[in-house]
Image: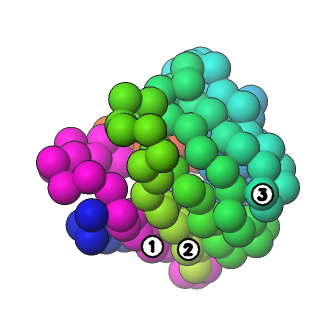
Amino acid sequence: MTNTIHQEVVFNASPERVYEALTVSNQFSEVTGGAPVEISPEAGGTFSCFGGMIHGRNIELVPGVRIVQAWRVKNWPEGVYSIAKFELKEQDSKTLLVFDHTGFPGVEKEHLATGWGENYWKPLAKYLG
């Protein structure tokens, strides 16, 4: 389970705004079309999104800078977690999000790589304008 997904996306918003959209429950629910979301605002707290299909724990939360999560899909084998890391870097009046996802089951790579774009980056870009 040493697979890695690396993606870089530019958003037309400040790093603080991107961070909030990814970590504030009602905002992320709006980003994802209204699906139930619960995100703890604290490191060590839990999160659940897409109606519980994705869940895990916040490992590190640095507002406007970094989000690191122990992240899993509901139907993965019990106890299997991956690491999702979101680095936010200011670029002029925009944000470069550098994303790395590691430690997921190998058969999931293509599905996950596509899913990040379709379920996170595209709706987030639309939400942020």
In the depicted structure, whether residue 20 falls above or below residue 83: above
The tag earlier along the polypeptide, 1 or 3, is 3
Q: Under tag 2, what secondary structure?
A: strand
- Extent of the magenta region: 90-117
Q: Residue at x 84, y 55 (%)?
A: 42
Along the line of sight, the residue nearer the viewer: 111 or 125: 111
Numbered badge on residue 87: 2
**Residue 1's quadrant in the figure?**
bottom left
Q: Position of residue 55 (x, y in %)?
A: 56, 38
Asked which secondary structure carries label 3, the reply is: loop
Is 95 magenta? The answer is: yes
Look at label 2 and name its amino acid. Glu
Estimate the spatial distance between the alpha carbons at disc 3 and disc 2, rounded to whole Å. Answer: 18 Å
Rounded to the nearest whole Å, what is the CA distance between mark 2 and mark 1? 5 Å
User: How far across and how far down the image is residue 65, in percent?
Assistant: 68, 75
What is the CA distance from the residue labelled 1 to the residue labelled 3?
A: 22 Å
Check whether the beta carbons of the residues at disc 2 and disc 1 lie within 8 A of each other: yes
**Residue sitting at x 55%, y 74%:** 87
Q: Residues within 10 Å of mark 3 (few under 14, many from 20)?
A: some
Q: Nearer the viewer, residue 55 or 79?
A: 79
The residue under label 3 is which amino acid type? Gly
Q: Looking at the image, is mark 2 or mark 1 earlier in the sequence?
A: 2
Which residue corresponds to mark 1?
A: 98
Q: Which residue is label 3 attached to?
A: 44
Q: Is residue 27 left or right of residue 108?
A: right
For residue 124, above or below residue 92: above
- Tell me the crowding category of disc 1: few under 14, some 14 to 19, or many 20 or more residues within 10 angstroms, Cα based: some
Residue at the image position 33 percent from the left and 56 percent from the top: 104
